[in-house]
Amino acid sequence: MAQSNKPIVWGPFAAGGTITAFLTPVLILLTLLAALGHVPDLFAYAKMHAFASHWLAKLAIAAVVFLSLWSTAHRLRITCYDLGVRADTLVATIVYAGALAGTAASVLYLIQI
Amino acid sequence: MSERQVELEVLRYNPETDQEPRFQRYSVTCREEWVVLDALNHVKENVDPTLSYRWSCHMAVCGSCGMMIDGEPKLACKTFLRDYPGVIRVEPLAHFPIERDLVTVIDDFMAKLARVKPYLIPKEPAPADGSEYRQTPAELKKFKQFTLCINCMLCYAACPEYGLIPQFIGPAAISLAHRYNQDSRDGGRAERQEEIAATEGVWECSFTGACSEVCPEHVDPAAALQQVKIKSTVDWYKKHLMPWAKE
Amino acid sequence: MPYVRTIPRVRWFFRHPRYVRYMTREVTCLFIGAYTLLMVWGLRELSQGPDAWRAFLECLASPASIVFHVLALMFALYHSVTWFNLTPKALPVQRGEDFIPDGVISGAHYAVWALLSLAILVLAGAF
């Protein structure tokens, strides 16, 4: 029985799970507060654009997007199997490709900011 | 000691005569302090000698009497009737084929257990003067929890991934491999990794955690499996990103 | 012939509350993933200038969006709690003979989480 290459997808999943555990709730809360109009100008264009213009912020945002989408993809893959969808290779390809596509898109938009 | 009338709904299966299993109801006068195993023994001795099941120690150390009691994997000798007010449903351990009545075919587990080499593969030869290997209390504590496994297979019955993916090596086998990997006297980790770091090894585990919830000896196999995942992942990245590094 | 029992392919997880809790934990990924995609969409609008960004903020303020965010927040919190509670199992720390209690490791994670969240809220100007 050969050792699996699963670690290659599991490593980013574990990192993503940790990042989303620490960050996602507060990010959702911020967005919710902006949506409710709690603090006017919470998501003001000038402020957001200035923040996202910094190269360090771009790197951080891209990393967070990648790890969040990857851990989502991996969990979704497992869940599909748990719910009776047995075509694991197909599901894996779709979900990981989706995560990478989302990451690529975010990188593209970050470059344009 | 007072008595109580207990209704047992037991899954019966005779491979020679039955196409499918069926439930049989027994009404048993039990003593209040009895466990399910006592009730089964009473049935076998006084009511129906054809009822088949495994048991041995009656004190939760041999791991023989695992069965589904009201749908939950339990040791029959550790399941008290007083905790079950209604009809008690007794079935063979889930995720294993039924041999006869409550007896399951456990060959799959036995084979997997052997594959992980659950014995000491010494790192160094034994001292020439015939003395023992030395081990500090800290070194012992590192793996002690995982030595408590009694091979009762309740974890396999609880694990949904084992139910869905029969090739999965499973919680107990991997925990026992981990027990030896963590033992300071042992040098066989590389050999065991071939089995437990394979796809059918730890990577089928999705950290449901059911195994640890049902374990009667508090081994916490779920913890062992996650620790194996992390170590295997670190190893993999080291091997592939730093191939020059010595193992 | 030994008899092999079948498992209901999809409904197996209704058999016991612990499997329902497991499934709930797993589907948190749908909300976290959806929110992240929302973030990516936001990045796109941000890159297209102030008008696009304003339109995006207006979408965020819609009732559907607010309902989504409340649900997403609940599921994200469930993910965080289950993740921090399970971390000590995966990363035991032995100090001397004994292991650091699970509660201490989880507690440290909760503390960092609280401080980090507070810091982000303050830095973003939510107060």
Image (spheres, coloured by chain):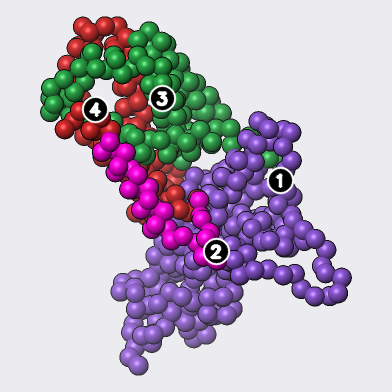
Q: Is residue B221 above or below residue B45?
A: above
- The residue tagged 4 is C124
Q: Is mark 4 on a helix, strand or loop?
A: helix
In the rendered image, the quadrant that contains the N terminus of chain C is: bottom right
Residue at mark 3: chain: A
Chain C colour in the picture: red
Q: Do the residues labelled 1 and 3 touch (CB within 8 Å)?
A: no
Determine the main secondary structure of the stretch shown in magenta. Answer: helix
Q: Which-is-in-front pick, marks 1 and 4?
A: 4
The answer as to whether the residues below labels 3 and 4 share one chain is: no
Chain A colour in the picture: green
- The residue tagged 3 is A60
- The residue tagged 2 is C96
Residue at mark 1: chain: B
Q: Which of B98 and C20 is in front in this view?
A: C20
- How far from the left and from the top, in percent, is residue B219? 53, 64
The span picked out in magenta is: C91-119
Q: What element carries label 2?
A: loop
The answer as to whether the residues below labels 1 and 2 share one chain is: no
Chain B colour in the picture: purple
- The residue tagged 1 is B194
